């Protein structure tokens, strides 16, 4: 399942704190918290953004997001790709 996870920094959290916490793993390092993360987008200002995670188990998702809950507030939605071709034929 694909999860759209919007985050916003909590009050008092600095951009540097977020960058230090969410820096990608170095070459050869394996961080469990990054398992399933497909994309990470920060909005201008760096204190808000979106993380796209592909993971089946909701509890595994919790394991990824919970360690940083003291720094950010999460809004999480499950998303599903739509087959557009059948819908596009209705517009013709």
Image (cartoon, rainbow, N blue to C red):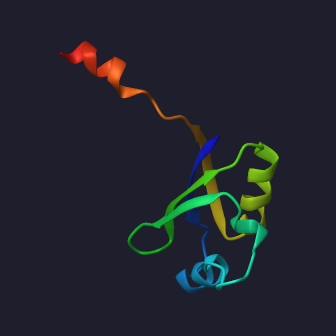
Q: Quadrant of the N terminus?
A: top right
- Residue that appears at 52% across and 61% down: 39
Side (left or right) of 88 relative to 3: left
What is the x, y in percent for residue 61?
A: 74, 52
49 to 45, vertically: above or below? above
Q: How many marks?
A: 0
Image quadrant where residue 91 sits: top left
Name the quadrant containing residue 85. top left
User: Where does residue 84 sit, x and y in percent of width and height?
Assistant: 36, 27
Percent across and percent down for residue 29 are 73, 82
The residue depicted at 82 percent of the width and 47 percent of the height is 59
Image location of residue 49, percent across then percent down: 49, 62
Query: Closer to the camera, 38 or 42?
Result: 38
Is residue 44 or residue 31 the one in the foreground?
A: 31
Residue at horizontal 72%, vertical 59%?
Answer: 65
Q: Is residue 27 left or right of residue 33?
A: left
Indicate left or right for 89 with 30 as reference: left
Instruction: Tell me the quarter of the picture where residue 87 sits.
Output: top left
Task: State which quarter of the image contains the C terminus.
Answer: top left
Residue shown at 78% from the left, 43% from the top = 57
Q: Residue furthest left?
A: 92
> 84 or 42: nearer the eye?
84
């Amino acid at each position: 399942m694909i999860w759209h996870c919007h985050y916003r920094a909590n009050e008092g959290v600095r951009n540097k704190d977020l960058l230090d916490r969410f820096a990608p793993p170095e070459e050869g390092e394996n961080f469990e918290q990054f398992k399933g993360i497909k994309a990470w987008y920060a909005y201008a200002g760096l204190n808000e953004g979106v993380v796209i995670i592909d993971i089946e188990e909701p509890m595994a998702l919790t394991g990824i997001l919970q360690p940083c809950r003291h720094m950010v507030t999460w809004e999480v939605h499950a998303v599903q790709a739509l087959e557009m071709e059948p819908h596009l034929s209705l517009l013709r």
